[in-house]
Image (spheres, helix red, strand yellow):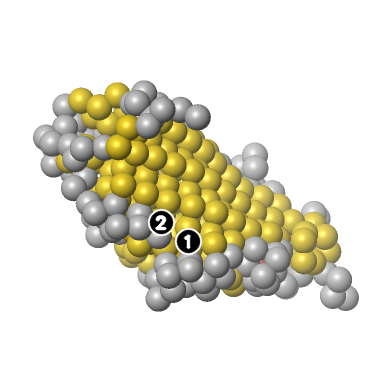
Amino acid sequence: MVLGQATRTWVSGVGDDVNPCSRTAPCKTFAGAISKTAAGGEISVLDPGGYGAVTITKAITINGDGTLAGILSAGVSGVIINAGVNDIVVIRSISINGSTTGTNGIRFLAGGQLHVENCSISGFTTRGIDVSKTGAGILSVENTSIVGPAVSATGIYIANTADTIKATLKNVKISGVDIGVDVVAGISSPTAISYMTILNSNISNNHTGVRAKNAGVINVESTSLSNNYVGVIASEAASVVRLSNTDIFNNSMFGIGNGLGKVISFGNNNIAGNAANQPMQVIAKQ
């Protein structure tokens, strides 16, 4: 631990970044508190407020449980993670609002694991959550909503130039964007693979709901992919999407898109009201 850093620090809407970030003398911003928080520690939020964009370079938890903790990031990214290869970062109960000009809600550029819990992300122009890494990583997103309104933006984007990224989305809502979930693996490297599992989520009212590209593999379970232009697509030969217990309704062009990859059904999905569907490979449960 660096001298003067605490395991738990505090921020308040009426705090001051010259303070030691203690419970009785809190800081005002996440950026002000992070330098006073030990690696592996936690920044906790005392009361409602806007706590500013932040860059994270070490293992840390930012916890807004119990209050309205916001980041207004007009023109910039709300949270940037550029941490160590084994570092674990947790973003919990934070509202990130790009105010229609913010570039990304959260960018995961380096680090071991990123866990996003009980958050809302909106008003971005590029990506809600951007995972653009050169090496392996783990992403977990749970009980989180991502809303446009930028029709050219992506809800959750995953791309890696080496190794493997593993991602899990559970109870996630994505709407009002160009591509809800875009797993674009293997950029400039045929050995780079990304795996994503989507559980109990709603990815609707977008141009494309779910897309696997390059060596991206997406497993979709108990999820709604409805009212998009294209519900789901595996766009290139090495890409795979597997569907189980999933509703694909009322997509105005394709429910199952006409890509070059494989869309595989376990035979227990509900598919109706789409303008057209590409044939799927249907396999038995194992």
Q: Nearer the viewer, residue 46 or 240?
A: 240
* In front of the other: 47 or 203: 203
**x and y percentages locating residue 3 in the rendered image:** 88, 75
Residue that numbered label 1 is attached to: 193
Cβ atoms under marks 2 and 1 closer than 8 Å: yes
Secondary element at tag 2: strand
Q: CA distance from mark 2 to mark 1?
A: 6 Å
Residue at (61% x, 42% y) in the render: 67
Quadrant housing the N terminus: bottom right
Residue 27 found in image quarter:
bottom right
Above or below for 51 versus 257:
below
Q: Is residue 135 above or below residue 198?
A: below
| Residue at image point 51% right, 38% down | 170
**Whether residue 15 is situated above or below residue 256 in the rendered picture:** below
Name the mark on residue 244.
Answer: none
Can residue 148 be seen? no
Name the residue rendered at 30%, 57% in the picture.
237
List the residue tagged with mark 2: 216
Question: Does 58 sit left or right of 5 as displayed?
Answer: left
Q: Position of residue 213 (x, y in %)?
A: 33, 58
Residue 143 placement, left or right of 203:
right
Residue 279: image location, x then y, percent: 21, 37
- Out of 184 and 18, give the one closest to the viewer: 184
User: What amino acid is labelled 2 in the image?
Assistant: Gly
